[in-house]
Image (cartoon, helix red, strand yellow):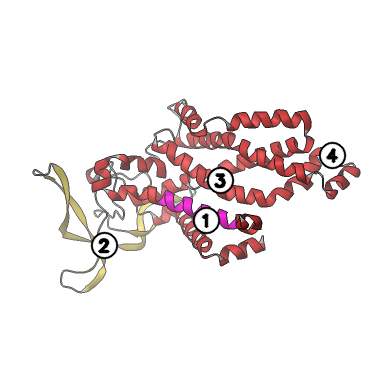
């Protein structure tokens, strides 16, 4: 493991990916503190407001404390569109580590302090707002908690099933192996994304987002275990003939004990690589479901359902800040893939020679 970490830190792309993911997860952990507004905040009069402009130079050309202006919404009779202009009649100075909207840190500790906020009558929208006047920056932080954790939660369900199933199949062989592998191949032949759409669409409409989130995790895990189990089975077929396995049999250790204690630990390198490379696919699956309206439901946020608003052509052209969730999904998936490729090269040097 030490060698893997050293090689990750030596590879400049993997190192950059680790830093990026570290910053993302740190921001998500501190979301309540970093977000200027709570996840329930909404100001319908501020729909589709552009990102707030932060000024550090006053009207006299002097250095000033950071401040911003509110936006005024006006209807343009020529273009037949809403226009937003800065209301320069009132400055709103940014306040750091000041009291703002109350929240519970990690859902437990009551707090009021935010990293940055403005006076009550001012509005600070670092990445603009959506159609309901909700702060996009704050929702990115809260929505990322779902999008960036669903993959790991699915792996906690998927990998134990796949490991044990593949281990038993490869160890016993014969008819049991044939039957188990045919069943796994049948599961693998199911179009996974379309099955996800069907299963998600039949979920009761009255379910909370937490319940829906848990069910999506379970569905993703129950679909993905088969391919993993098949690879584990192939590895077990070669491992079970080694001397240490025969020695364990000779001293009377149970078959299940041999599988769990002696054979499956030998697949650790593959498991680590597979886990790293599997997380991006689950992030994309959740985002895709939420984008289609079958995943996390409004008003709760995930990067997928936030991105859904950007599918309209006018929003892409005139409100590009709504595309931010898509950019973060791209960055997160790329970072996980870079780390996974580097780990694979370290643990499987033969892959570099192909």
Q: Earlier in the sequence, mark 3 or mark 2?
A: 2
Q: Earlier in the sequence, mark 1 or mark 2?
A: 2
Q: Residue at x 73, y 39 (%)?
A: 167
From mark 2 to mark 4, how far is it between C-alphas?
68 Å
Query: Which residue is at the far left?
Result: 78
- Residue 115 vs 267, above or below: the answer is below
From mark 4 to mark 3, how far is it between C-alphas?
32 Å
Q: Is residue 29 visible?
A: no
Neighbor class of circle 2 (other Cα within 10 Å; few <14, some 14-19, many 20+) is: some
Q: Residue at x 28, y 39 (%)?
A: 312
Identify the mark at residue 338; answer none if there is no mark. 1
Q: Is residue 333 magenta?
A: yes
Q: Earlier in the sequence, mark 3 or mark 1?
A: 3
**Residues rendered magenta in the picture:** 328-343
The residue wearing badge 2 is 54
Answer whether labels 1 and 2 touch (C-beta < 8 Å): no
Query: Which residue is at the far front?
Result: 354
The nearer-to-camera label among 4 and 3 is: 3
Q: Position of residue 76 (x, y in %)?
A: 11, 45
Which image quarter holds the N terminus?
Answer: bottom right
Identify the mark at residue 278; answer none if there is no mark. 3
Q: Earlier in the sequence, mark 4 or mark 3?
A: 4
The residue wearing badge 4 is 254
Characterize the magenta stretch by its predominant secondary structure.
helix
Q: Is residue 229 visible?
A: yes
- Residue 144 vs 346, above or below: the answer is above
| Disc 4, SS | loop
């Amino acid at each position: 493991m030490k060698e893997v970490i050293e090689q990750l830190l030596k590879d400049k792309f993997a190192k950059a990916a680790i830093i990026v993911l570290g910053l993302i997860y740190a921001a998500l952990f501190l979301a309540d503190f970093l977000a200027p507004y709570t996840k329930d905040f909404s100001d319908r009069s501020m729909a589709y407001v552009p990102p707030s402009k932060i000024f550090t130079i006053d009207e006299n050309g002097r250095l000033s404390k950071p401040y911003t202006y509110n936006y005024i919404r006006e209807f343009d009779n020529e273009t037949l569109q809403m226009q937003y202009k800065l209301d320069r009649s009132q400055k709103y100075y940014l306040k750091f580590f000041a009291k703002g909207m109350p929240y519970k840190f990690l859902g437990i500790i009551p707090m009021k302090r935010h990293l940055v906020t403005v006076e009550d009558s001012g509005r600070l929208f670092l990445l603009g707002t959506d159609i309901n006047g909700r702060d996009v920056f704050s929702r990115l932080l809260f929505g990322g908690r779902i999008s960036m954790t669903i993959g790991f939660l699915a792996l906690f369900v998927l990998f134990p099933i796949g490991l044990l199933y593949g281990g038993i199949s490869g160890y016993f062989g014969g008819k049991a192996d044939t039957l188990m592998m045919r069943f796994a191949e049948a599961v693998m032949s199911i179009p996974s994304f379309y099955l996800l759409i069907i299963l998600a669409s039949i979920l009761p409409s009255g379910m909370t987002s937490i319940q829906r989130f848990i069910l999506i995790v379970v569905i993703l895990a129950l679909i993905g275990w088969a391919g993993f189990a098949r690879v584990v089975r192939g590895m077990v077929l070669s491992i079970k003939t080694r001397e240490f396995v025969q020695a364990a049999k000779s001293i009377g250790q149970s078959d299940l004990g041999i599988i769990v204690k002696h054979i499956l630990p030998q697949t650790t390198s593959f498991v680590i690589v597979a886990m790293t490379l599997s997380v991006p696919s689950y992030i994309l699956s959740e985002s895709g479901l939420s984008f289609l309206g079958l995943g996390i439901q409004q008003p709760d946020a995930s990067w997928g359902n936030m991105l859904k608003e950007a599918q309209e052509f006018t929003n892409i052209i005139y409100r590009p800040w709504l595309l931010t969730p898509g950019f973060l999904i791209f960055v997160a998936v790329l970072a996980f893939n870079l780390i996974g490729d580097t780990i694979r090269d370290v643990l499987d040097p033969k892959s570099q020679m192909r």
